[in-house]
Amino acid sequence: MTGRPGATARLLAVLRTPWVRWGFLVLALGLAVYAVVAVRDDLLEAARAMSAGRLAAALGVSLLFVAATMMSWRAVLTDLGSRLGTGSVVAVFGISQLGKYVPGGVWNIVAAAEVGADHGVPRRRTMTATAVATGVGVVSGAVVGAVALPFLAADALGPWGWTLWLLPAVVVLLLPPVLNRLLALALRVARRAPLEHPLSWRGLGAATAWAVLGWVCAGLQVWLLATGLGMATGARTFALAVGGYALAWMVGFLVVVVPAGAGARELVLLAVLAGTLPHAELLLVVLVSRALVTLADLAFAGAGAGAGALGRRGPLPPLAPRARLRWDAVRRTLPRERARVLEVGCGQGAVGARIAARHDYTAVELDETTRAVAAARVQAVAPGARVVHGGPDALGTDERFDVVCAFEVVEHVADDAAALAEWVDRLRPGGLLLLSTPAWPERFGPWDTLAGHYRRYDPERLRTLLLDAGLSDVDVRLYDAPLGYLLEAVRNRVARRRARSRSGAPVPAEQTAVSGRVLQPTSWAAGALVTAAVWPFCLLQRALPHHGTGIVAHGRRPTPAPVRHSHHGHPEDA
C-alpha cells in the first residue's frame, strides 16, 4: 500500500509535464480539425444549396450554443467557490473542450483540471464542476427532449429508447442533498480533501437554465439548416429540431468510447427528423450541423489560447507572430524564481509586460514615443515596474541585475562588442545575459534595411562575441522554423513596397527609432488570433533547434573564485 501513492504521484507528474500536456492538445486539435476536414465536401454542398447568410447564422447560433454550455459550467464552478473572470473562463473551458474529440469521454474533464490549475483552481474542484455540468447537460437534454416528445415519433430513439428510463434516476442523483453526499463519498474514497463549498439549489438552477438555453440554440442551428434545404417552417419543426438535438446529445454522451459521441448522435438526429426531408438532405443537415459545432469549439479553443495570456492583473499586450515564437523560446530560459530583470530596448513592451508579471522589471528604451507606450503597458501589469528613457547609462551606476535581456537590439548597434560589454557590466556575478537577434548574414534583406540593422549573425560568430564579452556557459540556438521563413518573406515584401515610396538612403539610427512600432498588433482580438494560429509552431520549433531565421542566446557572468587564506594569513588563489 505504501508504494501506490508514490507510483501514482510519479504518473501524475509525467502526465503534467509540458510535453505531455502540449502533445495532448496537439492530438485533440488535430482530431477536431479532422472532424471538419472529413466532411468538407458536405460543407461545400451546403454552401451551394443554401445562402451564405443562413450558414453564417447557423454558425453564429453554434457559437451561442457553446457559450451557453460554458456559462452552465461556470455557474457550477462558481457555486463550488471559484469565481473566475471572463478571460480565465474562456481559457479553461475553451481549451478543455478539445478533449471531447479524443476517444474516452473523460479527456475534457482532465484537460479542464490541468488548465484550471494554471488559473488557480484546485484540480478536484474543476473536475467536479466539469462532471456536474456534464450531468446537468445530460438531464436537461433529456428533459427538453421529453417536453418535445408530443412532436416526435414514438420510436424516434430506436434502439436507444431505453436511455429515457434512466432519466428519473439521474434527476434524483443531481439533487443537491444527494449529489453533495455522493461527491463527498467519492473524494473520501479517492483520499482527496472534501469540497470547501457544497453545491446549492441556486447554483444548479443557474447551470440548468444556461444548459436549456444551449439546447434551444443548438436546435435553432439545426432548424436553420434544415429549413434552408426545404423543411417546413413552424413550431412543430422547431420543436423537433430542439428536442431531437437534445436527445441525440444525451445518447451520444452515453457512447463514451466514441469521440464526442460521433455516429450515435447523428443516427438519433436522423431518426428524429425522418420524414421532414429526403434522406440525402437530412444527412447533409446532420453532418453540417456537426461540423459547425466543431468549428465553434475550435473558435473557443483559439479564444481560450489567447485568453490564457490574460493575467489576473489585466490583459497582456498582443505579440506579433514572430515575437510569439521568440517568446516561447525566451520564457523557458528566464529564471523560475523571482529575479531582478533589466530589458535593454524594450520596444512597445509586449514582451516586457510578460516578464514584469513574474519578475522585478526595469527597462530602458531610446525612443520616447515607444517608451511611453511600453510604460503604460508594463505598469498596467506591474505598477512598480520602471521604463526609463535612454540606454543603460540612464540608470544608477551601481545598479546590477540578475538578468539582462536585449531582444532584437544588438543588430541595431554599430559597435556590438562595446554594447555587449556594457550589458555584461550590468549583471551581478552569476547573472544571465539573454538576447535574440536575426540569424545568417546571407539572409540580410529589405526588412533588415528598413528596420535599421547593421548586420545579421552567424550562430558561431555570436557565440565567440559572447565569450569575448566575458560570459561562460554560452548557449546559442536557432528558433522560428519552419514558420519564420514564411514570415520573413512577408516582411521583406512589405519592406520593398515601403522602400519604393521613399527617397534617399535610410539611416540605421533613424530606422531603429521606429522599428519597434512597425507591423505590431494593437488589439486583444488580434493577439488572440496570433496566439491560436502560432502555438502549434511553437511546439514544432522546439524540435528544430538548429533551424530558423532567428537566434536566442544566453550566457552567464562568471562568479569570482573565492579567496582562501593560508595558515600564515596571506591570501591564496582558490
Image (cartoon, grey):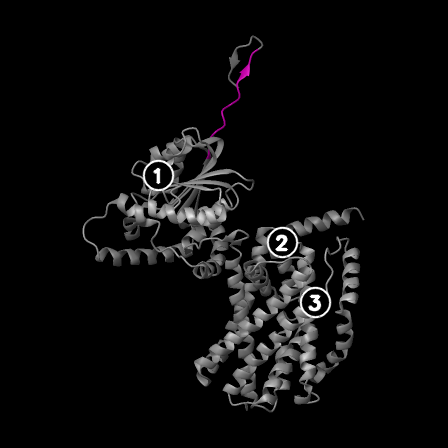
Element type at marker 1? loop
Residue lying at 67% horizontally and 54% vertically, measured from the top left: 122
Precedes in sequence: disc 2 or disc 1:
2
Q: Is residue 315 visible from the viewing direction of this image?
A: yes
**Pointer 1 and pointer 3: residues touching (CB < 8 Å)?**
no
Residue lying at 26% horizontally and 45% vertically, measured from the top left: 510
Per the rendering, the mark at residue 117 is 2
Left-right relation of 377 to 490: right
Type of the residue with mark 2: Ala
Precedes in sequence: disc 3 or disc 2:
2
* Residue 231 image-quadrant placement: bottom right
Per the rendering, the mark at residue 202 is 3
Per the rendering, the mark at residue 390 is 1
Nearest the eye: 321 or 103: 321
* Residue 285 image-quadrant placement: bottom right
Residue lying at 22% horizontally and 57% vertically, measured from the top left: 500
Type of the residue with mark 3: Arg
Per the rendering, the mark at residue 477 is none
Left-right relation of 253 to 453: right
**In this rendering, is residue 507 above or below 165?**
above
Per the rendered image, the range of residues in magenta is: 556-566
**In this rendering, is residue 555 above or below 211?**
above
